[in-house]
Amino acid sequence: MLAGDRLALARLITRVENRGPEIPEIMRAIQPRLGRAHVLGITGPPGAGKSTLVDRLTSHLRAEGAAVGVLAVDPSSPFTGGAVLGDRIRMQAHTLDPEVFIRSMATRGSLGGLAGATGDVLKLMDAFGFPWVLVETVGVGQTELDIVKLADTTVVALVPESGDSVQAMKAGLMEVADIFVVNKADRDGAHVLMAELRFSMHLHYSSSASPKDIDWETPVLATQAVSDVGVTELLAEVKRHRAVLEAGGALEKRRQARRRAELRTLLVERFASEVLGRVEQDRAIARVFDAVADGALDSYSAVSRILSTMLRPP
Amino acid sequence: MLAGDRLALARLITRVENRGPEIPEIMRAIQPRLGRAHVLGITGPPGAGKSTLVDRLTSHLRAEGAAVGVLAVDPSSPFTGGAVLGDRIRMQAHTLDPEVFIRSMATRGSLGGLAGATGDVLKLMDAFGFPWVLVETVGVGQTELDIVKLADTTVVALVPESGDSVQAMKAGLMEVADIFVVNKADRDGAHVLMAELRFSMHLHYSSSASPKDIDWETPVLATQAVSDVGVTELLAEVKRHRAVLEAGGALEKRRQARRRAELRTLLVERFASEVLGRVEQDRAIARVFDAVADGALDSYSAVSRILSTMLRPP
């Protein structure tokens, strides 16, 4: 794969997706090649036209000669599949381009498992050598927000119709958005939504407790992705964000924080599977689980007992 | 609280919400009083009229003389708050009724933290003696689904307008739904949505790998909660589901499985905070974290090193 074999990349992604035992070896081998790609996350509610935006952004980047990796992630249950299939159809214009690599991923496990697998796949694409990697999610739930936190620059796409479904997630979206896009901007309500977003971002800045590490105010852009309107401006803002991130050293600081968070998540994930193994092997731990299942013991007492068995003292 | 003091209940809930160090003691003390309440979960996208449904169900249960505990959970960021406030206003008719206890909860932490806190609050309400506890979520994301998994019976409320936002979560909703309610059923599209849900449930049953533990086909009901239309029928179906669950011993089996899952989640949560503590105390572990942050070491190698330091061999 490191020699540029796309089929090898595709196969490694499958292995990483399947969370097999060879993952540590794979990730160790690609470690020295990481950090060159700029990862662009695109999130937003279903129907916001994210796939079309990704398709148009890919065209613009290709016109500049850049190779592009695209990852569409669907954290909903494996039964759906529809959204991911739709993405593939929309990206058809690029499937014959050898400088564009497109991949879809559906749910694997839980407890940060999908975000973990997504992070590893993004690393494979980075190590392969794509200067741009685009990661798209199908919705705006917590899992999707966890996924876009893997990106260096995050675009949140909305449409005038998003309304209610976005309302509940608004604060979460404002926290992750580096750029807001109001797509299908020719529809009724687009200007109102843009004004609302600008006002909300303004409130968010004034109320936000976390100090800003870069000089950046989240812009609110209008696009009509199907007609390629506003995409040039969007890509320009993405590049401006990248430049601002790189100039002040914030990019590396954010990546460091992300790597620490990733390590914590992986530790917790591995501990969780360790617990499952010990319940099967260790009769004392199994008995504690049984007592909790029968309602004879509360979970907190059980946790103290099990952790004192499993952990070495600090 | 166990003597029926509502103020004591409210104070204990606050302590449990704040995840303070006294929680294990509280949960140990109420353990013998658990398991009498039937927990009814109500989930669905924003705007589906869940709060009104909860309000009407409460009225019907009160008319039968039953005391009711109500918990509204908002897993979105603390900045929102709006939805929870709305719930309180809608439930105003019951706020003077001493046999109805209403509580709202917003986000606390992450990694299953909210589901954990919600589970503990539901236990407090159970131990207090409410025969019915209603738990309502504001949306249909993964966190909300984790929360309704705490319920014995889960009602999924939709409206004809739910459309796109529900589409992405459909499989997840079908997995948790014991009863589907199409609310605002006088609106255009209600009959189409009901037919779609029945068809989807039919497909779900035929494709679902998990064997069913009870003889139950998820009904699809029509309501107009604001006019109290269909609520009698909904409550009757909830009671029928409860009876079916209890008859075959499935209720206890499900609760056992839930307690095991809860213990696993709590173990993982406690391990995660243990890791944070050790990074501060243990210089060797801190150095491994630093190496990962700098990109010098991959996470998988780091996890192996840290776990071999922290865990006793099995």
Image (tube, coloured by chain):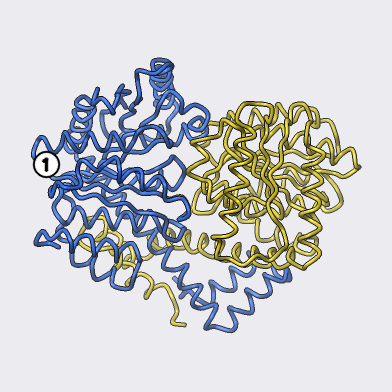
Chain colours: A yellow, B blue
Chain identifier of the residue bearing label 1 in the image: B
Quadrant position of the C terminus of chain B in the picture: bottom left
Eyeballing the image, is A23 above or below B37? below
Which part of the image, by quadrant, shows the N terminus of chain B?
bottom left
Identify the residue shown where x is 83% and y is 35%: A59
Q: Amino acid at mark 1?
A: Ala
Residue A60, position as x, y percentages in the image: 84, 38
Viewer-proximal residue among A60 and B196: A60
- Residue A44 horizontal side relative to residue B5, left or right: right
Q: Residue at x 46, y 70 (%)?
A: B273
In the figure, is residue A111 to the left or right of B115?
right
Indicate the quadrant where residue A293 lies: bottom left
Q: Residues within 10 Å of mark 1 (few under 14, many from 20)?
A: some
Query: Who is closer to the viewer here, B96 or A6?
Result: B96
Q: How many marks?
A: 1
x and y percentages locating residue A46 in the rendered image = 58, 33
Please give the residue where the numbered disc 1 appears in the rendered image.
Answer: B66
In x, y percent, where is residue A183?
A: 68, 34
At 40% across and 49% down in the image, what residue appears? B74
> Residue A135 in the image: x percent, y percent?
69, 45
Left or right of A209 on screen, residue B116: left
- B236 sits to left or right of A274: left
Taking depth in this image into account, of A195 and A43 the one nearest to the observer is: A195
Location of residue B290 with respect to B237 vertically, above or below? below
Nearest the eye: A144 or A235: A235
> Mark 1: which secondary structure?
loop
Q: Residue at x 39, y 29 (%)?
A: B158
Q: Quadrant of residue B61?
A: top left
